[in-house]
Image (cartoon, helix red, strand yellow):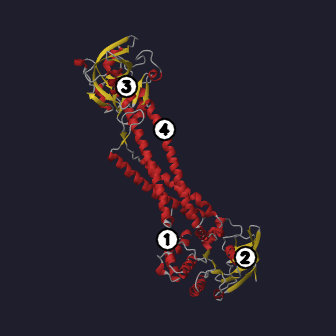
Amino acid sequence: MNNTHETPVVKLRGVHKTYRLGAHVIRALQGVDLTVERGELLALTGPSGSGKSTILNLAGLIDTPDSGDIILNGQKVNDLDEEARTLMRRDSLGFVFQSFNLVPVMTVAENVDYPLFIAGVAPAERKVRVAAQLEAVGLQDHAHHRPDALSGGQRQRVAIARALVKRPRLVIADEPTASLDSHTADQVLDLMRERCHAEGAAFVIATHDSRLTSRCDRIVALLDGRLV
Amino acid sequence: MNWMWLKFAVQNTLRNRRRSLVTVTIAALGTAAILLAGGFALFTYESLAEAQARESGHLVIGKPEQFVKDEETPLQYGLDDVAKLRAQLLADSQVRAVLPRVDFSGLVSNGDKSVVMIGLGVEPDAEFSVKGPFLTITEGEVLSNGANGSKGPEIMLGDALARNLKVKPGSSLTLLASTTEGSLNAMDVTVKAVFSTGVPEVDKRLIYTDIATSQKLLNTQKVSSLGIFLSRMEHTEGAQARISSAAPQLKVLTWEEKAVFYRAVRDLYNRIFGALGLIIGVIVVFVVTNAMSMAIIERTREIGTLRAMGTLPRQLLRTLSLEGMVLGGVGAIVGILVALAVSIFLYTANIQMPPPPGRSVGYPLYVNIHAVLYIGTGLLMVALTMLASAFVARKTVHMPVVDALAHT
């Protein structure tokens, strides 16, 4: 699935990121270089504090590096203003969170529809794409349910459908199986892998879960803010 | 506006129903309080304006000095030959009636006792038919034109003055006043009726008689001024401009320029009810601010999620403002319904207010239903709640997405 002739979905080049917690300075990333290709399922592993989430935040354009470059779809995004970054997230990125982060007052269909709605997709097309995504994740019969009526696994499937419905180039997933039991986690992992390859979107997944890493195309290990 | 934002806002207001109910209730009570207080003030203004216009006429025309100078002798600045002027004024299609008036003062005596009086010479038939029931006749019958032939000059006097002089209808009194030449004149009159204006201080002094009697007493053919009664209150300013230009040598005042009491009450009520409205507005803003603050703090992580998915801060600000609009809008609608119900009840219940200071009779408690007031208050409530929501939301929707997602 890696196609070296295509522009990488995201490329981190010499990225440094430092956080300050009171008097403490935490070097979250120290010169990280990372390239994610189109359709690649990439696992980021490492102990807590190794910098996995920081890479996800930077690749997901919800945080900015202290130095180094982040190149998304061939475009350097370091210097983009907040609105441009927001619009780039809207158009090119999907997110899957550990605790699902579905909007509780929306139905399953409305949650999946939301990214298309804010992107200004026509209602008729939204309806078709939402139905297709729900069918793909096996939740077409739950379209009008609220998230609180679903199991954890079902909620994460809704989150995956929500992330993929706008056909993003990159999906950022932070510990997507951490809140799930092993059987459900397996199902979700299979689904992610299947959808990744079906949609052609790259997945960058931060995880401690060895079952997940075994299903990924590539594993990148981090320690103390460096790739190992 | 896309309806989905509104739908999302409505769904969000239903997350914590008890909190939303409290917010809506406060907005409803605030709206109802403003509408009822404002409606009462408008009823009061309207009543006072009607009373003043009925008493003086919508317009009063006279010599300019009549309104600004003190007379050295009675009717020094009075109008001559009013018949021609009346005919000219009555030619205006908006003029319903023109009533002459002679203002005079002097003494009224029962033979044993003399009391200072303020007299009004009027054309009784026209005066009482045009003005309607502006006096309460407590004894006797109202004055009428041409009644002087058999019984001689007749007067009506205030009930306090009648008690002071120990007279009743049919009793004889003597009026004493300075003539236009400055000499003293006296005239025997018969009491036709006793009335009450509802203002004890006025009822101690006031007498009504017909124009001819007053002119005879003052030894003149002049009148003090002419009261012009229009077909509609709203014609006042236009008619004033037309009549002023047609008779530039004379001064034309509106009822409002003559209405010192009306202006004083209106200024006082505007301040009182303005302060009340301000307090209510502040309370509503605080309640909505508090409710929205709690709602937004609870949803900080969700806001971070929506931001991560590509929602612009202004889109979130809009939907959170719409939540305020929904709360304020529902509150305003409920408040309007409550105010309407109370106002209609008061129109049917005929509840009497106690007499205000300086008066001896109460008045019905009515609350006007004024479309502009209702629409304005409703819009104000919606605007206040929207602004309050936007104010508390602005910080959260602009906070870094990473921080919002990490919020617990």
Quarter of the image holding residue A28?
bottom right
Q: Chain of mark 3?
A: B
Judge depth for marks 2 and 3 and give the one in front.
Answer: 3
> Do the residues bearing badges 1 and 2 touch, measured as CB atoms within 8 Å?
no
Judge depth for marks 3 and 4 and give the one in front.
Answer: 3
Judge depth for marks 1 and 3 and give the one in front.
Answer: 3
Answer left or right for A39 relative to A222. Answer: left
Circle 2 residue: A12
Quarter of the image holding residue A192?
bottom right
Residue A123's disc number: 1
Q: Chain of mark 1?
A: A
| Position above or below: B4 against B348 | below
Q: Residue at x 44, y 51 (%)?
A: B32
Q: Amino acid at mark 2?
A: Leu
Q: Secondary structure at mark 4?
A: helix
Q: Amino acid at mark 1?
A: Pro
Answer left or right for A130 relative to B194. Answer: right
Kindly report the distance in space between the C-alpha atoms of the residues bearing marks 1 and 2.
36 Å
